[in-house]
Image (cartoon, coloured by chain):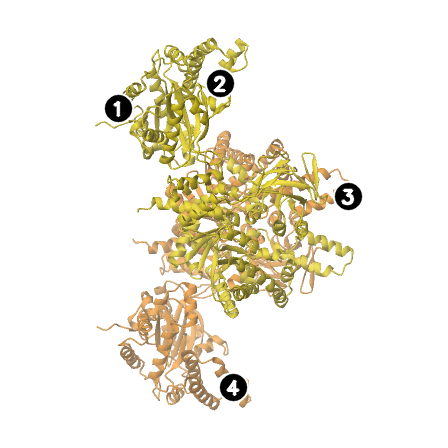
Chain colours: A orange, B yellow
Amino acid sequence: MPTKYVYEFSEGSADQRELLGGKGANLAEMTRVLGPDRVPAGFTITTEACVEYMREGTEPPGLEEQVDEALAKLEERAGRRLGDPEDPLLVSVRSGARESMPGMLDTVLNLGLNDRSVEGLARATGNERFAWDSFRRFVQMFGNVVRGIRGERYEDAIKAAKRDREVKQDTELDVDALRELTGTFRSIYREETGEEFPADPREQLRHAIRAVFDSWSGERAVAYRRLNGIPDEWGTAVNVQQMVFGNKGPTSGSGVAFSRDEVTGAPEPSGDFLIDAQGEDVVSGVRNTLDIARLADELPDAHRELMDILRTLECHYKDMQDTEFTIEEGRLYLLQTRAAKRPAQAAVRFAVDAVEEGLLTKPEALLTIDAAALDALLHPTFDPQVDYEVLARGVAASPGAAKGEIVFTAGAAVRAAGEGREVVLVRPFTEADDVAGFDAARGILTSEGGKASHAALVARGMGRPCVCGASDLEIDLSAGTVSVNGTTLSEGDRIAIDGTTGTITVDDVPLIEPEITEEFRTVLAWADEVRELGVRTNADTPADARRARQFGAQGIGLCRTEHMFLAADRAPKMRAMILAADRDERRAALDELLPLQQEDFEGIFEAMEGLPVTIRLLDPPLHEFLPHPADVERDVERARIEQSDDLQELEHTLERVHSLAETNPMLGTRGVRLGILHPEISEMQVRAIARGGRAVRERTGHAPHVEIMVPLVDYERELELMRELIVRTAEEEGLEDYSVGTMIELPRACFLADRIARHADFFSFGTNDLTQTALGFSRDDIEGKILARYIDMRILDRSPFEAIDEPGVGQLVRMGAWLGRKEKLDLKLGICGEHGGDPQSIAFFAESGLDYVSCSPYRVPVARVAAAQAAARIRAWEPD
Amino acid sequence: MPTKYVYEFSEGSADQRELLGGKGANLAEMTRVLGPDRVPAGFTITTEACVEYMREGTEPPGLEEQVDEALAKLEERAGRRLGDPEDPLLVSVRSGARESMPGMLDTVLNLGLNDRSVEGLARATGNERFAWDSFRRFVQMFGNVVRGIRGERYEDAIKAAKRDREVKQDTELDVDALRELTGTFRSIYREETGEEFPADPREQLRHAIRAVFDSWSGERAVAYRRLNGIPDEWGTAVNVQQMVFGNKGPTSGSGVAFSRDEVTGAPEPSGDFLIDAQGEDVVSGVRNTLDIARLADELPDAHRELMDILRTLECHYKDMQDTEFTIEEGRLYLLQTRAAKRPAQAAVRFAVDAVEEGLLTKPEALLTIDAAALDALLHPTFDPQVDYEVLARGVAASPGAAKGEIVFTAGAAVRAAGEGREVVLVRPFTEADDVAGFDAARGILTSEGGKASHAALVARGMGRPCVCGASDLEIDLSAGTVSVNGTTLSEGDRIAIDGTTGTITVDDVPLIEPEITEEFRTVLAWADEVRELGVRTNADTPADARRARQFGAQGIGLCRTEHMFLAADRAPKMRAMILAADRDERRAALDELLPLQQEDFEGIFEAMEGLPVTIRLLDPPLHEFLPHPADVERDVERARIEQSDDLQELEHTLERVHSLAETNPMLGTRGVRLGILHPEISEMQVRAIARGGRAVRERTGHAPHVEIMVPLVDYERELELMRELIVRTAEEEGLEDYSVGTMIELPRACFLADRIARHADFFSFGTNDLTQTALGFSRDDIEGKILARYIDMRILDRSPFEAIDEPGVGQLVRMGAWLGRKEKLDLKLGICGEHGGDPQSIAFFAESGLDYVSCSPYRVPVARVAAAQAAARIRAWEPD
């Protein structure tokens, strides 16, 4: 039997993407679901035919006959013939590879028109202008797409025609003008190709099919494949489909219909339509469309059929649908269906309703939600009913809206918050020193930096709205003003920012507070039933810890101890510790810090009520706690001039500040290296943990489970030494329920994870630093300078600090997880980088076999849903 | 047949390390080579016996009998019996695992002594004091080592004995005192163990053997195994050996002998000996030793036998030997033999002689050389005949000695060199700006930083002697003085440094220039015959290129173009380019740089006469070419005060300097990222390469083969875009013989090397940056602050910037090489980090299948020999 190269739509299904291409398989599936009369009929020429064509340089034997046969059936079903001078059948020809591929021949519409059939179309639609406009478009599209004639040649001819007739718009060209233009277009074709424009529809079709095959080897398609790793040998399919017309009079029409309300998710179909119009008229907004409910009045049969079909499609595709339809002389055709885009609240509503209606199982319902979009439900927003004037725009760096008086320093923010005032912290950029101000401010606004800047990261971590990199702002810190587009604002003036959209305004826009609706709560509960990945939070304060627990966090995956040393009452003691002249002086300073640190831990342990708390030992280089060298230099200079008594001490500070300064602090004396150099600091922290834990157990009866985490380990022995110190100190302090583990955040650690695992009870992958080191990307330096350009040049599609870089950083994580578990089967594995809150990355971590992700409190609900989706997808692959 | 647990030395050989342990196998091998009469007889109890003992908690059945049997043979061969009251046999008992393992029981000497046999020993040696001293040492050692009695108990008793007798030294204790002390020691034994000190030599031996077995499970041995990854199940062997005595009168003696002159390598044995003495007397220097040649006069037979044996050992071990011997009553025993440590010139001399004598093949001869030590032959040295006063010491950072006037700035160095003066550049530390001064100075001296500091790296690269981190120096740049230990030197004062030893002096020590001797030349020629790895050089100037060719470099593996922009005539143009207000201004600045850059390339191409030259496109962040922000701020301030016309321009510079400043420059906007952001810079460089190549071809007839190298690639598409730019520009300029490749110097690139290889003709592994990123170690920040501490704490044994970190960075290199070759079989692979000049790392690269290493000019000879050694070793593994 000869190879079957041609499949009618009614023969195929969705799982035949390889053979029929994506588009062909989709059309077949819709035909299968709705029956052959509801989808304009047609057929698909297989990718195998294309592969044969490429190999042999000509159509494979039998293809032409099979196309003829399929066409004959199509004509029979449609009751019209290609090229018929009365009521001609017209077809579209489209390419369709296994994956959507820009750069290939896309579409030829209206194929089948010629001098005779155009008159038939005019009669059938009662619209001569439409018929001739369709013809001239076909000639143009065919010449351009099938034969590669430059578009300008046609554009020039249209311009000339408009000039001749002294009109401005294409739509003003009348039938005569269009007829003449069609002639001109055919002359262009003759000039460019040396051939007459084919009048025979069969010849038109042969040309178009061959053009689709050839386009697979076209320069742009090849370049696209190279870039996206698509094999050359896939080939493309060709889809030939009957065209239907919604502009054939009062019983015809076109429209779009959603299976449910696309804004609220309420279970009533929504959409728009127009009578006697084509689809593009509905979309273009030239005419006022009617609500889909009105279709019941205009064409009640079609309306009833459409409602049934929407329900059928929802059941079949297990998701809310967004469809395009055309009614041709009373007969309803579905042209397309796809999952409906919808705002977060509608997605949640649909998921809950669909389960209650018995339409979907819980895992299926969860998979219909865009987890990333749920973020919008957790933050205040500007009231969408109120108009306001945009002062400037920046990067939408951390979602939510905030209003308040402008302050320019963290100190001012803290003071104002102490007085009960609401403030927005406005800075060119922020640094570690400013973190206290983040907590005190309602929102953060910067003129520099992007989504991965310090301000953005900290704001997201703390759930503070943040707009970054609003480069139109001119901030004069010494004058205490911010100027933008002619407006100058001073400290104390009110401002409002929306970190979800990046807008800034001085209008007093009312804010709407978020609420976790009953439906959202239901979805989250289902997510917890379905997911296997634990969800913890990154929290450094009791307030964050409590918030995260409200959002469902199952523990703290990362508690950074350094932020605790930046508070006003600790910073001077921390500095004294660092500047200590000898070990005794340092111990004395540490003794003063210990009770404060203990207090911090007690607050967090209480908030977590016995859930696990992963505490990371001090990580940043010590110079981060010291003043900037330039500031100290200025102080020294002043003291020298004033012959101040402080001079000697200031000079000592300057010397120490200089000696601690680093060229690349990210790669310097930090993490475990600090613990090796200054074991007394780690010791103090372990004591504070132990004592805090005991105090909380005695007070509340909840013994915290502490996981002590050593950061930045490279070498097995680093962890071995630190573990010795931790165990020794914990024993001295009588700490019982604890474990010791490490951040895996350096490429070397991933390679040596088996050896490191010997000394670890758990690993937490620090994907922020792992990304920085594996890619050689300093987040602070790359974002803003490089990332945007890289995305423009298609080197990257998302920032590697947002979505885990799977082939590089992701493989390192997998290698680390695998080697770690090889050595120690019950090693607990988590991840605590920014990526722990990104749904795409969460799916990767779930597939990598991690035990939990940890993310900022406000991302916890997102992570719960994303984790459930990952589990649902993984189960779908697994054999029963 | 029962398991054989005991092997006489004459039964074993060197390849039985697993069964007999390292020491046992060595003793057996020496016995096998020299015959059973030349090595004090003995036997080895196998590691299997130890394993059985550990498993069962008791000696395996048959062991005791086998030991008795071996002991009987030993007594028979020695003609003495253990415990004999006349002339007793004494034995030593030693542990000996497969690998040498500190932390285990080491040695018990003089086993077999008791109240009766001590008298026999006294009679046999005619030395009663010696006999009793041996006995009390045995009792002490046995109690301490075998039964774990604390050493202080014995020390206290000795102190008391000396107090009683009013003497100061142990040696002043007479026979009576020693006899009494032995009694006291036995009382201590009784008190501590509750048992009598065993008088029966058989019981002594049983105890000692069991103690060796037990020591395998001792705390320190277990800790050592954990740290070094030695399996617990290996077990240790036990060696029991007859003791011989060189202090038995005028026909006895002890000594050390080298098979050749250990200083020059000349083919005459050397060494020292003493008549009527034990080995420790020779080593301790208490008596004046005699030259080994004098043995011919004293004991001519023993001398002749020794000479024969030395020759035999050299033949057998295929290397120059360092032996210990004892003559007991005219009978010569060899106690130990091992490869002789020797200075580089002796190593070279031996290698050449050994081949000429037919003793060794060329590969064998090459393997006897310590390649790293050859470095010493390539640099001037202080005349070793002349004494001088050391002013201070620092880190020996780059070998060779240098003298000259002190200068404190690169500019001063350049001016002085221009006037023909010799200078030494003295700085607290150095930076990119100082590089011109390195070339102009004879040597570099810094008070900060270590072997991996900028100064050390650049100095080694340029072959300049350098002493770093001489922390006693107080350098006052503004005063133009350097003070050290009370001496203050000013600019222009003369100073001398030795970068091989780290010493600094103000004495006018004469320097000895190095010469590549005929023998060294021979060795290098053989290395070239044997090696498979190519050896190229890292060279940025024609002078370096020529020097490297003299040393045998086969091409340039890394030509850094950034150094070219630091020269006095280029720096202002480079700054103008960076500070350009728009693209036109930048192009104009680049047009001025182009001919200068072309000149640079011409010089290098001419020097290399058609050998391949790998040119790396601009790599460092642009701010490295700009003045420091603090300097510009000062200038702006001054201009403001003086109301200078330059103010506006200076402010512009300041703004640009600030906008280019980076938190972590190592991970910032550099490498290929520069080329993507500023393609016009790369374009200029490719044009300069092409035009320079053409000019040289026309002038000399040698067409250079250029390899254009793109640094710091992470993503396939980065290289794809750069390749497009390079190919387009090269075609415009008519460049023909060139290839395009990339540095692989980021962990991600190693993981994605197959995709990157699609656009690369070659890879060069940049192991410096790969080490920095894989380990998260900023070279500038870690060295000096962390490395020393890490080596102290046994986290590291060598700096990862000197020797490649095999399990981390090394595996990344192998992964990159494997993936690259998988995609492209003929991909050329090289390495151009500092590690390219380190013999241990070169062996790793050879095993990894790389095509070449590239190192600084002065390391080229070292690399040639190291590469030959690697090839010889690899061939030795391979089946024939």
Going by the image, does B651 lie left or right of B618? right
The N terminus of chain A is located in which quarter? bottom left
The residue under label 4 is A172
Front label number (1 vs 4): 1
Residue at (43% x, 68% y) in the render: A223
| Chain of the residue on which disc 2 is drawn | B
Query: Label 3 amino acid?
Result: Ile
Front label number (4 vs 2): 2
Whole-percent x and y of residue A583?
Answer: 60, 32
Name the residue nearer the viewer: B133 or A44: B133
| Chain of the residue on which disc 1 is drawn | B
Helix, strand, or loop for circle 4?
helix
Label pair 2/1, CB-CB below 8 angstroms:
no
User: Between disc 2 and disc 1, whose residue precedes?
Assistant: 1
Query: Label 2 amino acid?
Result: Glu
The residue under label 2 is B152
Whole-percent x and y of residue B115?
Answer: 38, 10
Q: Are marks 4 and 2 on the same chain?
A: no
